[in-house]
Amino acid sequence: MEKYRILLTKVSFEALRHIRGSNCESVSSFLTYLMDGNWEKNGSAQFPVVVWKQISGERYLFSCKIKEELYAIWEVLWTVILASRLKISKYAEEGIVRDFSLHIILYSLGELPGQPDTLMHLGTEDFEKAGTIERRYLSFYDREPKDEVRYSEELYYLRRALIESVLNGEQRGLVLHMPEEQVAVLSAHRTLRGPILLSGEAGSGKTTVITHWLVMGELDKIEPQLFVTFSPRLTKQARIEFEQMLPIDHGPHQVRFFDIQRIASRSCQCRRTSITGPLKRDDS
């Protein structure tokens, strides 16, 4: 069992999918090296690790030169063990009874943003080079286990078994990570039946929760499910994320994704009519 679980940002996920040639073997070996925790021991001759300290704060990041012009940047944070908490049989890890564990957030795979010997940039933050691995830079072991992740973008849980398939361009079996509050909502999945109301402001993660709900229903082989929303863009996004989370060996699924315009159009076609423009509200 790996010591660390890896969460990919969208940037690192897309970079991983576009690794080619001899770099694939090097990146695969490096990711296994990260998961096993061997990087904590002053790195290695093949994968030397550098520590970076936030100039205006207390964050520590780590980087490693995998090959020429190919660097990895990551941070170690406590967060919820998602698959085990939700008891998703296809992804749950045997023997796990803890709520939280240390995860590696892999921010980047590519050129090092900044000056490799002195300064590194990540988003709007600047980091200065602190040196090589020492015990004092592994302070995450001393922190209270709780959800420390900043949920500003999607994070994909990369299991060891998926490394090769992602490097080959496959996009299946990647579970979207979620904060503790959303996990609590989904934990009721196996007991709730019938209509439910899920409310929250824009960007609060309603679609992510519903997409996980659909995945769990699909894996539990319940009756066919239907996803409907007003936005064609959101419908497409939900379908892509749903299909990415399904196991690689999963066959055709029973979930249908529609936006309200398409449903209205199909309904009219069934009555041998057509829609010539956007649906308009009738206030008469």
Image: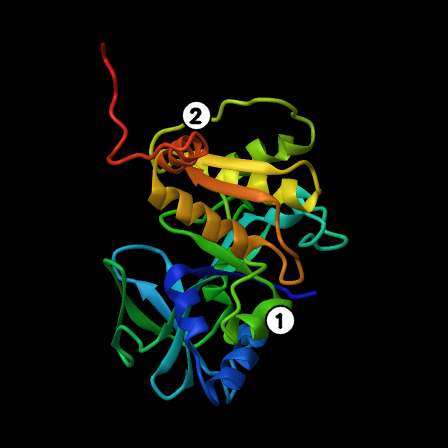
Q: Between tags 1 and 2, which lies in front?
A: 2
Q: Nearer the viewer, residue 97 or 206?
A: 206
Q: Earlier in the sequence, mark 1 or mark 2?
A: 1
**Relative to 194, is 114 on the left or the right?**
left
Rendered residue at 56%/54% (across/down)? 245
Residue 191 is at least partly visible in this image: yes
Q: Residue 237's spot in the image, x, y percent?
A: 41, 49
Q: Residue 160's spot in the image, x, y percent?
A: 62, 68
Rendered residue at 72%/46% (across/down)? 97
Q: Residue 199's spot in the image, x, y percent?
A: 43, 25
Q: Amino acid at mark 2?
A: Ser
The number of numbered discs placed on residues in the rendered structure image is 2
Q: Which quadrant of the rendered structure holds the N terminus?
A: bottom right
**Circle 2 residue:** 199
Q: Nearer the viewer, residue 216 or 2?
A: 216
Q: Which quadrant of the rendered structure holds the C terminus?
A: top left
**Circle 1 residue:** 36
Residue 166's disc number: none
Tell me: residue 234, above or below residue 164: above
**Relative to 133, is 253 on the left or the right?**
right
Residue 141 is at least partly visible in this image: no
Near mark 2 (Cα within 10 A), the count class, few <14, some 14-19 or many ≥20, is few
Rendered residue at 56%/81% (across/down)? 29
Near mark 1 (Cα within 10 A), the count class, few <14, some 14-19 or many ≥20, is some
Q: Nearer the viewer, residue 91 or 129?
A: 91
Label 1 residue SS: helix
**Relative to 126, is 98 on the left or the right?**
right
Label 2 residue SS: loop
Q: Amino acid at mark 1?
A: Asp
Residue that lies at the very extreme toward the top in this rendered image: 284
Q: Residue 177's spot in the image, x, y percent?
A: 51, 49
